Image: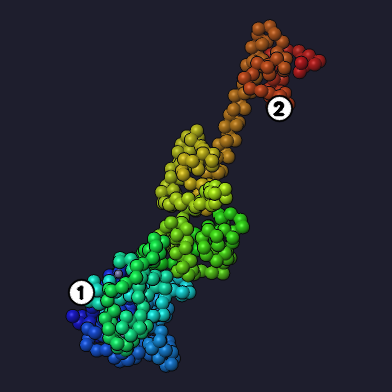
Amino acid sequence: MRSKHSVLYNIPPIGIGTMEVECLTSYIARIAYAHCVETGTLINEILIPEIKGEGIYKEESIFAIYRGGTSKFNGLSVAADKNANIMNRLCGRDDLENLTIIKYKNILNDNKLLKKNKSWCPYCLADMKEVQYEKLIWSIMEVDICHIHNVKLEETCRKCGALQNHLKFKTLNGFCQKCSHWLGNIEKVQHGGNESNSKKVFIIGNLLKDTRNHDLITNEYMIKNLILLWDLIPSPKREFVENNIGVQGKLLSDFQRGLKDKISLSSLIRLCTFFNCSTNDILDRLMDISFELLIKNEKLVFKNTKRKLDIVKLEKELIEYLNSCEKDEKNYLSINELEKKIGHVGSTIKKYFPVLYENIKKQNTESREKLKKEKQKERMELIRQETIKLYQSGIYPSLRRVFSKLPFVVTGFEKEYRDMWEATIIELGIARRVNQYD
Ligand SMILES: [Zn+2]
Ligand SMILES: [Zn+2]
């Protein structure tokens, strides 16, 4: 089982890529167990010397971290990062950061992120026949139910009532750290929460099952989406944010002003709930956000109508449109008509493809000017022909008479039309009357 170069057994972690993924502290306890040593021995003899070697902590901090602060090992702190790396190195693996939330360190702050003590679902423990392990999702503060069994998670030993640390020196997964009582007792388990509670857990589960390298998850899209949302929401904006999304009024404006670049997990969940979307929708792509005004119980209510923005498809459609216009000017649409054709508002097009948008606008204006000129040319020709026609039928082609024959209304003040008429009169060699406009 010991791999060629690793110091410790290379035991596969459980559930990577699923909501049931194991947490790092559970893995550390399992590794100690597999080596037939207490977790404390593994910590004292291997982890602490390793972390000392990194030279980033003072002696007393190291003591504090491994005695009291082990819940942080499953989060996004330096302690999580270092311990995942050390364990990767010692076990000859490269995937143990998936047992933490490190990959979201550019997105999430640690405000109310992790529970201080362990919690667990007794049913899940009872279901784990061969290997007792603890799930990463149980360590998240927002999670208080099991999404599989819909029961409340427990956090004290049924026998002695003790709270459980994430890593204690005598840690054995699934057993009380004080009295060694098994924690998988399913008698008198409390029923879980309502639907919104379980929705929340699935949103979190979606984050945890993501196995991309954490370096790849940047806050770029989240910030853009939040700024866009702030731009679009109706005034008074802070009030709207608090009443409709349920996050702090200044959260979004702080992003817009560049004062913030991370979000708390609970705010991220509220945004997902508001948009009825997954965290990926907010973190991985630009959202197409628009609002629909509804009247509900005689009150105005804003409802977001979410449309997924396929940025690649939109760009392709815009380029195709521009190309078709270059081939045939008759294909030009107004921005309004284009919005209907493409299915996205002009501000979206402008936001993501400013150059294309300006191109479309420019070509639009040019083609409209051109069409206007062509139309004018046609009208001038009509004036000329009507003047000649009247003259040839023996009627004096006065300006008023000519204009009355036209299929469009001329007020008589358009100079270019008058000039055309005069030029035709001169061409025909007709003497001008004194009151030539009669
Ligand atoms: Zn369960
Ligand atoms: Zn106990």
Q: Position of residue 289 (x, y in %)?
A: 49, 53
Instruction: Please tell me which residue lies in front, 239 or 211.
Output: 239
Instruction: Please tell me which residue lies in front, 164 or 324.
Output: 164
Q: Decide: is 87 above or below 398.
A: below
Q: Real-space Cα distance between discs 2 and 1?
A: 92 Å
Is residue 220 among the parts visible in the rendering?
Answer: no
Q: Amino acid at mark 1?
A: Lys
At 44% from the left and 60% from the top, the residue drawn is: 272
Q: Is residue 7 left or right of residue 302?
A: left
Q: Are marks 2 and 1 in contact (CB under 8 Å)?
A: no
Q: Nearer the viewer, mark 2 or mark 1?
A: 1
At 38% from the left and 88% from the top, the residue drawn is: 67
Tell me which corner region of the image, top left, top right, bottom left or bottom right, holds residue 423.
top right
Q: Is residue 404 left or right of residue 139?
A: right
Q: Residue lying furthest top in this view? A: 394
Q: Position of residue 388 (x, y in %)?
A: 65, 13
Q: Is residue 26 left or right of residue 345?
A: left
Q: Amino acid at mark 2?
A: Glu
Disc assigned to residue 414: 2
Query: Which residue is under mark 1?
Result: 129
Q: Residue lying furthest right in this view? A: 434
Instruction: Please tell me which residue lies in front, 71 or 97.
Output: 71
Q: Position of residue 163 (x, y in %)?
A: 37, 83
At 76% from the left and 18% from the top, the residue drawn is: 437
Q: Residue lying furthest left in this view? A: 1
Its colouring scheme is: rainbow
